[in-house]
Image (tube, grey):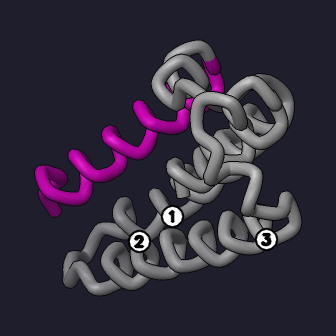
Amino acid sequence: MIVTAKRIAEKNSKAAITVRPVIAQYTTDFLRLVLTVASGITLTAYSLWAFSLSTIHPFAEISVITVTFALLRYIWAVERSSGEVPEEVMFSDFYFLGAGVATALLLILSVYAHN
């Protein structure tokens, strides 16, 4: 998903076409389709994992909400600005970082919360 978002940003920048000529062979519609499919697979895999945890506490299941928000926020941030450097997109977006911290907290609670 991150690689596809990076390719979309490179396609939109036009300067990357001279650096990486293969970018010109991709259509924007195809890259967006791949991004959509990759996002869906990522979210499905995470959801299956989170719901497979056999604990009494629903913290892992609740983290699906924060992961969904983070995925959508990342895609929105890439669409809004240049996504050629994924770590800049991630570390410069306060909401993305907040979703990451919330997800980490929920997963820690799912492991260490006692009855």
What residue is rendered at 68% in x and 50% in y? 23
Q: Do the residues labelled 1 and 2 touch (CB within 8 Å)?
A: yes
Task: Give the secondary structure at mark 1.
Answer: helix
What number is the disc on residue 96? none
Instruction: Check if residue 65 falls in the magenta segment.
Output: no
Label 3 sits on residue: 30
**Pointer 1 local density, CA inside 10 Å: few below 14, some 14–19, many at least 20:** many
| Mark 3 or 1: the one toward you | 3
Magenta segment, principal secondary structure?
A: helix
Q: In which quarter of the image is the C terminus?
A: bottom left
Closer to the camera, 84 or 89?
Answer: 84
What residue is rendered at 51% in x and 80% in y? 44
Say left or right for 60 vs 35.
left
Residue interval drawn in magenta: 93-115
Residue 41 screen position, x and y as percent: 53, 79
What number is the disc on residue 64? 1
Residue 83 screen position, x and y as percent: 66, 31
Real-space CA distance between mark 2 and mark 3, rounded to the nearest whole angstrom: 24 Å
